[in-house]
Image: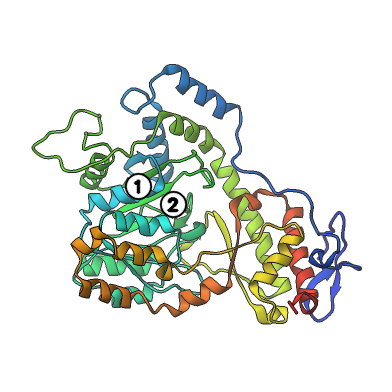
């Protein structure tokens, strides 16, 4: 590698990797000097436009969507960005998922096929409708739902397939949409982490019947707490809109009581939308920076070995990189446990994180099944069958033991930052034997 680090010069790593190493590089965990002391870029970032929009919304005193213009402005801007006809701005991403399921009339006795490797909100949105999440095992190479295993999980109660485009990578939409068309089962895309991701040039969230986004503080497009449902279907749009606003019409007129059904208040506030309109101006620039740094990390980690970036399917033409996801191979690190590897890398000043745990084994599922509400809807044999179907997910079990990731703000750094990440990992690998717990 021809580039140099400001504080360390890589030399050939004897028998461990092709990445160069520094002399006298005792691991920080063992008392040495860390590779890095500087923080990575903070998130969210604000500028003059964010403040100006916020103050304009504040001073107008038109703080909800019927009075103001910011929510409508954002819905149009987001729809134009994605190339989709209809957008319903919601209070958060979980609310977007709930509104999408309500539009499809998903409820008690229904099943939704979903990945077990996701944030808990995906599953809670299903349970909030008194439907049952049925987990389809994970594709270890991509960390996405294994589309080849979807069809075997379908029953007469299957009401929707919910692929999660985790971390900005995309599920295998060719296979998922083919199953959807052939079996007549609608698709709700959980694109809450997939801003600007694309499948064969089409934006994530626009391929299924409905797509859902989150604009929570840590997302690539942040609005504090906010979300959106997108669709090209007029009826689904009206039903999703109605659910999110007590079944008012898109003009926020009082509902026609003869045709409305249940709804709740999931409306986005004008303040959230004002921020999002400003944040959108930097969305593409930030996305390009993340893509460039991800490509650099792919190359550097490939030279080290033992840390495998997740694959993407050929149809994924753009990864939004909300997360930079990897698999840890302990055999390349002298059997160093993942927990100890994480501890050692973090000591070098690198904010590496482990991935999600096995949701199918999380106590909240059993507590929900035993609740009075669910026992009123489902019989004990039905719940027992559901537990059994969700029990055996061997690929996901393996993923939860080996996954690692960096958050999107890490990828907003400079090339030097990516080199320091690689330097820290290479350093840990060189001293893996010394770092093993006694």
Residue for badge 1: 96
Which picture quadrant has residue 284?
Answer: top right
Q: Work out whether residue 199 can be spotted.
A: yes
Q: Work out whether residue 109 can be spotted.
A: no
* Nearer-N-terminus badge (2/1): 1
Label 2 residue SS = loop
Label 1 residue SS = helix
Q: Is residue 170 above or below residue 43?
A: below
Q: Residue at x 52, y 73 (%)?
A: 399
Q: Give percent across and percent down for residue 333.
A: 71, 78
Relative horizontal placement of residue 428, taking residue 156 as reference (left or right): right
Relative horizontal placement of residue 221, taking residue 350 as reference (left or right): left
Q: Nearer the viewer, residue 317 or 266?
A: 266
Q: Are marks 2 and 1 in contact (CB under 8 Å)?
A: yes
Residue for badge 2: 192
Q: Which mark is residue 159?
A: none
Colour mapping used in the image? rainbow
């Amino acid at each position: 590698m021809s580039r140099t680090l400001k504080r360390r010069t890589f030399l050939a790593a004897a028998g461990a990797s092709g990445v160069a190493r520094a002399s006298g590089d005792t691991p920080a965990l063992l008392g040495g000097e860390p590779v890095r002391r500087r923080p990575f870029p903070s998130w969210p970032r604000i500028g003059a436009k964010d403040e100006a929009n916020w103050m304009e919304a504040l001073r107008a005193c038109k703080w909800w969507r019927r009075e103001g213009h910011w929510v409508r402005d954002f819905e149009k801007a987001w729809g134009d960005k994605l190339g989709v006809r209809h957008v319903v701005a919601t209070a958060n991403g979980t609310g977007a998922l709930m509104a999408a399921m309500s539009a499809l009339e998903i409820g008690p006795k229904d099943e939704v096929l979903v990945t077990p490797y996701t944030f808990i909100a995906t599953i809670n949105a299903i349970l909030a409708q008194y439907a049952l999440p049925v987990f389809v095992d994970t594709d270890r190479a991509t960390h996405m739902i294994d589309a080849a295993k979807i069809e075997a999980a379908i029953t007469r109660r299957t009401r929707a397939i919910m692929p999660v485009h985790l971390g900005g990578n995309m599920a295998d939409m060719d296979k998922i949409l083919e199953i959807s068309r052939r079996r007549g089962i609608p698709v709700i895309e959980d694109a809450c982490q997939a801003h600007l991701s694309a499948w064969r040039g089409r934006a994530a969230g626009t391929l299924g019947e409905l797509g859902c986004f989150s604009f929570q503080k840590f997302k690539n497009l942040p609005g504090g707490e906010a979300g959106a449902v997108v669709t090209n279907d007029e009826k689904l749009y009206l039903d999703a809109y109605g659910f999110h606003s007590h079944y008012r019409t898109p003009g926020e007129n009082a509902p026609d009581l003869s045709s409305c059904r249940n709804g709740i208040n999931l409306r986005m506030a004008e303040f959230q939308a004002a921020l999002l309109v400003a944040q959108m101006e930097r969305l593409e620039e930030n996305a390009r920076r993340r893509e460039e740094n991800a490509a650099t990390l792919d190359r550097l980690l490939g030279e080290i070995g033992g840390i495998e970036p997740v694959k993407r399917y050929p149809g994924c033409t753009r990864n939004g990189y909300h997360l930079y996801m990897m698999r840890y191979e302990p055999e390349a690190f002298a059997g160093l446990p993942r927990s100890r590897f994480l501890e050692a890398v973090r000591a070098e000043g690198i904010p590496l994180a482990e991935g999600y745990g096995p949701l199918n084994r999380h106590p909240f599922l059993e507590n929900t099944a035993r609740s009075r509400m669910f026992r009123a809807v489902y019989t004990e044999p039905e719940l027992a069958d559901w537990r059994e179907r969700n029990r055996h997910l061997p690929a996901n079990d393996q993923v939860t033991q080996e996954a690692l990731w960096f958050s999107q703000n890490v990828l907003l750094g400079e090339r030097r930052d990516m080199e320091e990440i690689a330097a820290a990992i290479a350093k840990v690998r060189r001293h893996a034997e010394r770092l093993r717990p006694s």
